Amino acid sequence: MTAPQDQLNELLAQSKATSFLDSTFATYMDDRDPLKALRSEFVIPTRGEIAPGIDHPDESCIYFCGNSLGLLPKAVARYVKEEIQVWGEGAVNSHFKHRFGRPWVRIEETVQEQSARVVGAKKDEVAIMNTLTSNLHTLFAAFYTPTATRHKVLIEAKAFPSDHYAIESQIRWHHLDPKDSLICQEPREGEFLLRTEDILETIEKHGHEIAVVCFSGIQFYTGQYFEMEKITKAAQAKGCIVGWDLAHAAGNVPVQLHDWNVDFACWCSYKYLNSGPGGIAGIFVHERHANDFDRNRLAGWWGHDKATRFDMVNEFKPMSGAAGFQHSNPSVLTTSALLGSLSVFEQTSMQEMRAKSFLLTGYLHHLLVTEFSKDVLDIITPTDPEQRGCQLSLIFKRGKMMEIFEGLEARAIIGDERKPDVIRIAPTPLYTRFEDVRKFVVELKDLVAKIYN
């Protein structure tokens, strides 16, 4: 793909705008955006709802927080309302007889195929179930089988805390000490990002001792998109199992879990997948493990063979593939909310979203590096667009981050903060406009002039 800056330079000339900060350029980009119609599929809070008393209260706010919670797809209300209707009129019978053709005994199948497309998997390699950390525990219970010589787990040093807690507890569950069995990959001194060559060096050095390598696809704090295929291949060559937490990658960047030969993965659905707070999550188990029924697993009746599930026999017969790792019947309402969001994804592809994201985040990156000095803010997310998704993590200098964050919110601009000094800004391609990015930079310039002077 052509570098974003080269594309933007060409488009600037076509737009006849005087500069990238000219509203004419942002309008030109929004007019030619092939995904522009998808913005209308979402409920976007107004400026007045975010910042009561603000000017122009009926205009849409600027929302850059899809990396934490995606906006509400309008279709969610319809799908959830239908399930409430079916619950009311059919009660328990709706497990098998469903007015809208979605019987509850198969509700997870309504979101399985589209979820598989989002993560580059085959349908049977994906199961929609539980929540993110519960799924990480489920997968580690099956794939982390430490021995006296191979018992270590390799993670990034600044893994999301829930992942770190879960993996430490899995190590302790096997009566091992994380001090001996957990390797945390640190960035080089003075750096924020993990270099791929350093990760590969750790794998080469310690691979014979490592049972599982488990990184996040995109690092939550820095926004770094790890070279998943290269890391997976190197770790498996040393005999390691490889798993990925795709919380910040699913629905953000194209991944190819099947083709990259990943052993397992898990993700939530409330960030870029827009399924709502606490939404149902997903797992991936590569098809080569599909019939490995000797692998120990945490079993539940929803993972039991469908043909005899309701015979209520106490002899567990797991289904083939990821479905055999399911536990309880999934939440119908949260699954239906995910279905509502995925109905938007069906109107595009991860490749189309990635193409827009390249330009949208590239535009934001260019404006930030040209309009602000490094003694005010710096970007810790990779400059290489291939090594990031849509998120940019901005460090604000001299202890001014919270003032900037609160000032943005007072102007109905929503990002999120990570103490002590980072604001994460994520222009998601399904509903963010180039004009949103331009306005954000204009408002940020005004704030910086007031706070830093």
Image (cartoon, helix red, strand yellow):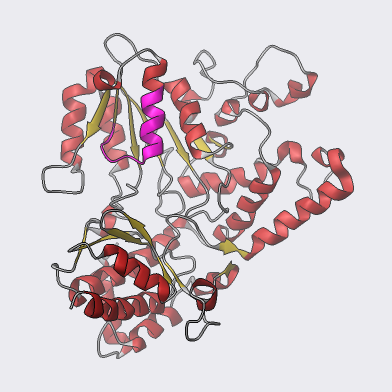
Membership of 24 in magenta stretch: no
User: Where, by quadrant of the figure, is residue 415 drawn?
Assistant: bottom left
Report the residue at 38% width, 28% height from top: 167
Quarter of the view holding residue 381: bottom left
Left or right of 316? Residue 347 is left
Point 40% across, 84% down: residue: 27
Secondary structure character of the magenta stretch overall: helix
Name the residue nearer the viewer: 67 or 4.
Answer: 67
Q: Quadrant of residue 323?
A: top right
Q: Which one is in front, 443 or 82?
A: 443
Task: Return the x and y of residue 452 as percentages of the image width and height.
Answer: 19, 74
- Residue for point 37% across, 64% down: 357
Whole-percent x and y of residue 95? 80, 38
Q: Position of residue 273 (x, y in %)?
A: 51, 53
- Name above or below for residue 401 compared with residue 450: above
Foreground residue among 439 and 1: 439
Q: Is 265 drawn above or below residue 87 in the view shown?
A: above
Quarter placement of the C terminus:
bottom left
Q: Which residues are magenta?
A: 155-169
Q: Is residue 447 visible?
A: yes
* Residue nearer the viewer, 245 or 260: 245
In the current view of this chain or complex, which residue is farthest to the left? 189
